[in-house]
Amino acid sequence: MSYTKRQRGVALNGLWGSAGGFASKADVHGDGNYLDALEWLTPNRSIMAQLVFCYFASVIVITAALVVASRNPVYSALSLLVMFFHVAGLYVTLHAEFLAAIHIIVYAGAILVLYLFVVMLLNVKREERFHRQATVAVLLGLVLLGEAFVLSLQKGTQHVFFTPAVQSDTMVAGNTESIGEVLYSAYLFPFEIASLILLVAMIGAVILSKKGLLEPKS
Amino acid sequence: MTFDLALTGSDLLLLLPEILLTLWLCLMVCLDFSMRKITHQNLAYLGIGGVLATLVVLIWFDLTGITGTLFKNMFVLDRLAIFFKIFILLATALVMCSSIDSVRTFRFFKGEYYFLVLMSTLGMMFMASAGDLLSVFVTVEFSTFGFYVLVAYLRDDLRSSEAGLKFFILGVFAAGLLAYGISLVYGETGTLIFSDIAGTSGSYGMTIGFLLIFAALGFKIGAVPFHSWIPDTYQGAPTPVTAFLSIAPKGAAIAILIRMFYVALASFKPMWVLLFIAGSILSMTYGNIVAIAQKNIKRLLAYSGIAQIGNVLIGLAAGTKQGSDAILFYLLTYLFANLGAFAVVIGVSHIIKSDEIEDYSGLNRRSPFLAASMLLFLLSLAGVPPLAGFIGKLYLFVAAIDQELYTLLIFGLINIIISMYYYLIVVKKMYINEPLDPSPLTVSIPLKTVVYVGIAGTLLLGIYPKPFIDWAVSATLMFSNIAGPTAAAGSIFGG
Amino acid sequence: MSGVDLLVEYLARYSSILIFILLAFGFGVVTLLLSYLVQPKYPEPEKLSPYECGSEPFSDSRIPFPVRYYVIAMLFVIFDIEVIFLYPWAVTFKQLGLIGFIEMMIFIGLFVVAYVYAWRKGALEWD
């Protein structure tokens, strides 16, 4: 994705120029191009991509740890919320905007509400939540960490963890459209199974949660 | 990107069994909420009718050789899939038949029980056809969701709730492992389709991915060391659900295992064979030894089921076409013996309200029919000639000998002796001990039908196994060229 | 290629979302800050103590929720996921043509069965 300097200028101008015009201070050549100064200040593209990734990844790791480490379950749920937003951010950096959006709608909007309901339903107190599973957790974590190292070392430097902004059809056509095109043709089978899963989930939810048998109204 | 989905009428024909069952299911749901007068028995018979109709379609497919693939190999309908679908539908019909008495005692949601059984069946039929990892994940989840609810069906019963919770938490954990494994495999190979994975070279990521997938499927079949949910879940769940859980999902998961390892990973056979040898020995030994100490018949059958899965894994450890033939045949023998035994347990517990082995004392005096059929089923499970289980075990051992897996063979033989011991404890209780309450036990007609079918299957597969072996052999014809010497040992049965 | 390029790309594509996020955060921060700065502060022990209708609180205010909320929330999640599937279908409706329409009708048909089931069984009622 290469923007002309003009486009970049417009994009920046639209954002910062309208906010007060302070960006003009960076206009060292006086030709309406604010970017050279920034270019001089910032690292190159792939390092920037890594930095963006590192920001999201480290927040995800920290908040995920807080989810299991907080003593107050409501704090855990809120850490989870922050985590969901940053996972959505990672999706955005991969240009999967649709996934990012549904991640927020479904996870942050619906699933997390369920978690909070459970917390309030059971009225979980702070002390009751802790179990002595730290040993198992550390052991499993070490195993997974080792696995990640093995996977990352085996291919050396050419192994790319994070591909910044891969240019593909998904960017041109719009992410939602390209998902729609494959979901309803190549992946029709899992899609229809998903509707059956929703059917079974609905019936299961009614059976397990409703008290007693409510006869249908005549 | 162009839109391409070439579905023709003949393609849809391949989906006919599933479509038929889905429509039947929707019909049942609609009848249940629209007609107040419809009883749960009628729904049960309607459901069994649907299962039998689907069975007829599948048998027609099998006889006329209708096969094919759909959705770019996501859905595969070959002889193997047809075999497992028939297997699952048979199990479903028998389980629904033996559920009618138990469902009568449920307080709420009697009709829904049958929907959920049918939905899980549908999910397992799709599992048998799953030709890529994405459909494996989706279909496994679909079939398991029904079971989560079914296991916890008795909401007033603490044991049932506990069973449901344990099953759910561990099941979701297994689903997580499955998804993680699949994503690793996809990251390394760039494809999810079994036949495409077969063409890729191995890597660490792929190995770890498939290990995780194996762990998740090992959870479904209850192989050691992924068995920890089995005893409590089997004990707490309503007994017909236990019966269903002990046979149908195992069959479906074995179908996926066979397809995954024989198709996608055929070139890595020396590696995964070791995995199955270890799993087989551990499952057989652990299941049989722990079963000895059990006081509850459902727990006994749970541990015996773990051991039986160990037997099934012998076939995968052999990793040959003969091994898969033997698995198919063995699962058939296990179907009849296991469901028969559970039908007897349902019949007994329905009257005496207990699953303790102690309460089976003197069953022979109270109901000679139930005692005799239980004896038959237990002997078949143990592998006593001339019953079905004997031929099944023999076939598996021959497959192991063919691959010179003598360690496995020795463990298998030792385990037969151990299993004989605890099965005979039950037999001794039934025939020698005095009954605590000598009143005779009566069995309802549907349950009796299941027991009769079980007896017929166990005897037929034991005395005249040839057509069934032929069927199993023809179902796995596509594996004829899998690595390893193809022995003529199958011919000792005239197959 | 400079790192600015990447940032500019993100900004060009997501600047509106960024503005929304900033506005949302800003609104929260500004409101809290303003009320803190503007309010008259005369703290007294009596005024700071929690009370309920003039008397001491009888119990913990964090009472357990009734399970009904949970049922509703659970059904909401299912509906939510259902709707998610409609978005990509809607934007590609023209390309998908008749087959796409039939696919979605099967999907919705199955869901209608589930919906009517839950409705008739009283799962949507508040009692």
Image (cartoon, grey):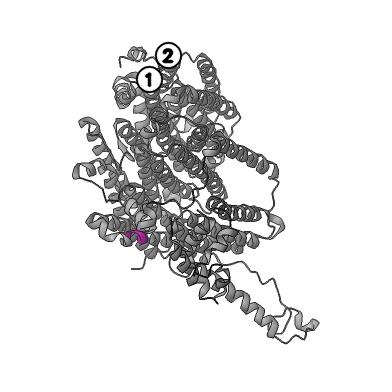
Q: Nearer the viewer, residue C40 or B223?
A: C40
3D distance between C-alphas at marks 1 and 2: 9 Å
Disc 1 residue type (three-letter): Gln
Q: Nearer the viewer, residue B423 or B145?
A: B145
Q: Quadrant of residue B470?
A: top left
- Which residues are drawn in magenta? C85-89
Q: Is residue B446 left or right of residue C49?
A: left
Position in image of residue B472 (x %, y %): 33, 25
Q: Which residue is mark 2?
A: B402
Q: Quadrant of residue B451?
A: top left
Disc 2 residue type (three-letter): Asp
Position above or below: C22 against C103: below
Position in image of residue B438 (x %, y %): 51, 35
Label ID, residue A11: none
The residue drawn where x is 30% and y is 43% is: B71
Position above or below: B7 against B302: below
Position above or below: C45 against B279: below
Within the magenta stretch, is there residue C11? no
Position in image of residue A156 (x %, y %): 55, 36
**Residue B359 visible here:** no
Q: Secondary structure at mark 2?
A: helix
Kindly indicate whether the residue at mark 2 contacts the one at mark 1 (C-beta within 8 angstroms). Answer: yes
* Between discs 1 and 2, the one toward the N terminus: 1
Q: Secondary structure at mark 1?
A: helix
The chain that hosts pointer 1 is: B
The residue drawn where x is 68% and y is 57% is: A70
Label 1 Cα crowd, 10 Å radius (few <14 / some 14-19 / many 20+):
many
The chain that hosts pointer 2 is: B
Co-location on one chain, circles 1 and 2 = yes
Label ID, residue B322: 1
